[in-house]
Image (cartoon, rainbow, N blue to C red):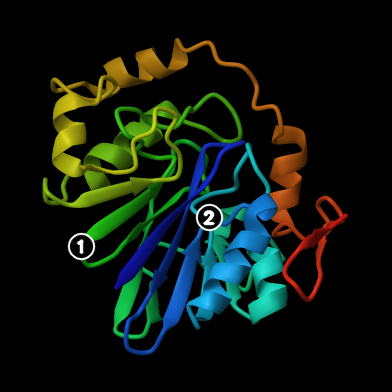
Amino acid sequence: MQLRQLFDKDSSTYSYLLWDLVTHEAVMIDPVQEQSARDIKLIEELGLTLLYSLETHIHADHITGGGLLRERFGCQVGVHENALATCADRALKEGDQLRFGESSLTVLHTPGHTNTDISYLAEDCLFTGDTLLIRGSGRTDFQSGDAGMAYDSITQKLFVMPDDLIVYPAHDYSGQTATTIGEEKKYNPRLAGNQTREGYVKLMNGLVLDKPAKIDLAVPGNQRCGINATEGLINQAGEIQS
């Protein structure tokens, strides 16, 4: 499996393009609408067949480009079934397998940041969305968040995996690109040192955080897979039109 990590500066979001070297079948994880022209150009330049555009959750800080990728490539859009997103082609749940060529992703339902959060497990890496970040974790104070549920997802589903498993998060705000399960168990300030569930809940509930600037637009926009969220269209050259 080949992997390309892409970045949206405004929302500090990582998108991931994965593809099989033999069949050139591909998957995109967490595309950002404002980067759709870039993503379309790259997919076409690499000669890939995009099968899936997948979300790790219903985002509050950006609008997905999944709907626009589907319009261009005919791929399926996937989001967790809790999202109740009628626009999606796949209502994903725990244990689902998404195959592309000889590679595959396994769906892990990892709620807590929201009740729609998914992590995607590949053969040698893990895409954790906002559930587990590099030396951090997703906030749990809005949009169906639950700190206790987040702790359970991290400790019972993610931290039981091999220490050397590479972790690719949905965001980073300090310039890091990846981590490992072992690093986060040892150095994550919210979770290291045998952090208890009670301690994690107290820590997360004590955070005072600003409301995401785009939440009122992003959440309903993402429940529509980004289509008609900003009336954006893509012309035949792959350029965003307003």
Q: What residue appears at the point 30 percent right and 78 percent down from the top-left corner?
A: 103
189 w.r.t. 164: above or below: above
Q: Position of residue 117 (x, y in %)?
A: 47, 48
- Disc number for residue 124: 1
The structure residue drawn at horizontal position 44% and vertical position 83%, both measured from the top left corner, is 25
| Residue in the foreground of this view, choosing between 172 and 207 | 172
Structural distance between the alpha carbons of marks 2 and 1: 19 Å
Badge 1: few (under 14), some or many (20 or more) residues near its Cα, within 10 Å?
few
Q: Is residue 203 visible?
A: yes
Residue type beneath disc 1: Asp
Given the image, on which type of amino acid does mark 2 rest? Asp
> What residue appears at the point 69 percent right and 51 percent down from the top-left corner?
34
With respect to residue 238, does 183 lie above or below? above
Task: Give coordinates of residue 16: x percent, y percent.
Answer: 44, 58
Q: Earlier in the sequence, mark 2 or mark 1?
A: 2
Q: Residue furthest bottom?
A: 23
Side of 113 relative to 66 (left or right): left
Q: Quadrant of the C terminus?
A: bottom right
Relative placement, left or right, of 144 versus 191 is right
Q: Quadrant of the N terminus?
A: bottom left
Q: Quadrant of residue 18?
A: bottom left
Between residues 184 and 83, which one lies in front from this camera angle? 184
Residue 29 position in % (x across, y down): 48, 60
Residue lying at 39% horizontally and 35% vertically, measured from the top left: 149
> Neighbour class for label 2 at 10 Å: few (<14), some, many (≥20)?
many
Quadrant of residue 239 in the image? bottom right
Q: Which residue is mark 2?
A: 30
Q: Quadrant of residue 26?
A: bottom left
Is disc 2 placed on a helix, strand or loop? loop
139 sits to left or right of 186: right
